[in-house]
Amino acid sequence: AVRAMRSVRPNVVVLATPGPYGILGLVLARAFGARRIVGYHTQLDKLVDMYWSRVFGGVSAMYLRTMDRVFFRSASLVVTNSGPMQESALRLGARDVRLVGTPLEPRLLAPPAIAPRDDFGPVLFVGRLAPEKNLEAVIEAARRLRNIGFLIAGDGPLSSMVKDAARDLANVDYRGWLDRSMLL
């Protein structure tokens, strides 16, 4: 990493996570005098209860908030994807926080017009299959609303739960991970 930084001599380093690679990037950016842009896309300290025990989760949340503060105070700019995330970054010490959109292909934004329907359904869920996405609520809705189809696409730690639901519920169709062309 040091050799690569020497050869490139960047003016800006983008730090996407307060994990080990992000910490290395922060140290190297400081060493080479590069400005730092921090991406803040997930409040990781809010997710620890979903993955770890109360004690380990509490310690982890404190560590993650501390690392966010270190990153934000060091950053020339913090970029995030929502107003609440902007507010959180400012509370944690960021000086300049900008909202950025999520890039989407034009064909995802300009579908052919479809006439409105009087009925409801089917339901489509696309995303990472993880506890923070509240997939339990989607599966529970499928259990209660058997007359509506539920199509789920994605992959992640809860994929076995979704596979089980698709096996047990006739109205749940699990497609796994799909690339954008298949998703369309």
Image (tube, helix red, strand yellow):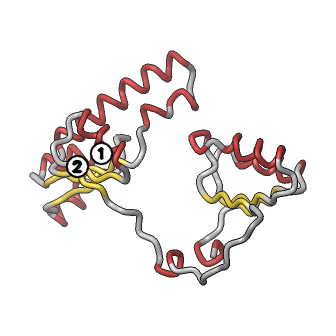
Q: Can residue 174 be seen in this snapshot? A: yes
In this rendered view, identify the residue nearer to me: 87 or 80. Answer: 87
Residue wearing tag 1: 86
The mark nearer the N terminus, 2 or 1, is: 1
Are dots 2 and 1 in contact, CB under 8 Å?
yes
The amino acid at mark 1 is: Gln
CA gap between label 2 and label 1 equals: 6 Å
> How far from the left and from the top, in percent, is residue 121?
75, 62
Residue located 54% across and 27% down the image: 49
Is residue 22 shown left or right of residue 133?
left
Q: Residue furthest bottom?
A: 112
> How far from the left and from the top, in percent, is residue 135?
67, 44
Count numbered badges in the picture: 2
Residue 70 position (above or below residue 53): below
Which image quadrant is residue 131 in? Answer: top right
Mark 2 surroundings within 10 Å by alpha-carbon count, few (fewer than 14), some (14 through 19), many (20 or more) = many
Residue located 65% across and 44% down the image: 157
- Check residue 65 in the rendering and tell me which mark sits there, or answer none: none
Quadrant of the frame with the C terminus: bottom right
Q: Can residue 21 be seen in this snapshot? A: no
Residue located 71% across and 40% down the image: 136
- Identify the secondary structure beneath mark 2: strand
Residue wearing tag 2: 97
In this rendered view, identify the residue nearer to me: 154 or 102. Answer: 102
Residue 60 position (above or below residue 16): above
- Identify the secondary structure beneath mark 1: helix
